[in-house]
Amino acid sequence: WEAVPDPELPKRLYYWNRRTNEVSWQPPPVLQAATIGEAKAAIIQTMGPAKPPPKPGTLGAGLVTRPKGMDDEHKQSALARTKEVDFVRDARKYGASSQPRPGVVGRILRDVFQRFG
């Protein structure tokens, strides 16, 4: 018997007997295993052939590895870069005008008033 994902609901499994081509939604009866090792082997056999691990640097690798948190140095660097990008964007938008550059709340309110009058 082999556990196979349902094509319509991949998290749902059905069971397929390769020898008899029989399928069932119910798990097959498990033979009595004498040891834990035999039980593990019986379970692994129902899972089908093992898939090779994804190649590093590919999309598949990103789906199975956990993202790493940033340390304080990286957080500070990212924050400084964000402030720099905001400054450049505002400088391009407002130029050297005498108008004060609005903060985040000011930009949001300005956009709301422009859209809805």
Image: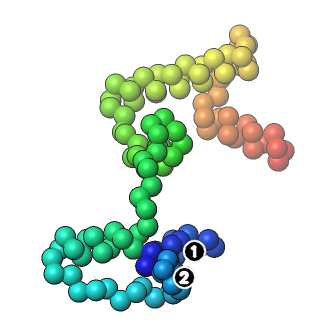
Task: Determine the CA span between mark 2 and mark 1.
Answer: 16 Å
Disc number placed over residue 62 in the picture, else none: none
Mark 1 surroundings within 10 Å by alpha-carbon count, few (fewer than 14), some (14 through 19), many (20 or more) = few
| Residue 20 drawn above or below residue 6 | below
In depth, the one of 90 and 106 nearer the eye is 90
Residue occupying the point 34% across, 25% down: 73
**Which type of secondary structure does the marked residue at label 1 adopt?**
loop
The location of residue 49, given as percent across then percent down, is 43, 62
Q: Is residue 15 visible?
A: no
**Image position, residue 92 (x, y; %):** 71, 16
- Residue beneath the point at 31% across and 85% down: 30
Q: Amino acid at mark 1?
A: Asp
Kind of residue indicated by mark 2: Asn
Q: Is residue 27 above or below residue 51?
A: below
Q: Badge 1 is on which residue? A: 6
Q: Which mark is residue 21?
A: 2
**Residue drawn 28% across and 86% down?**
31
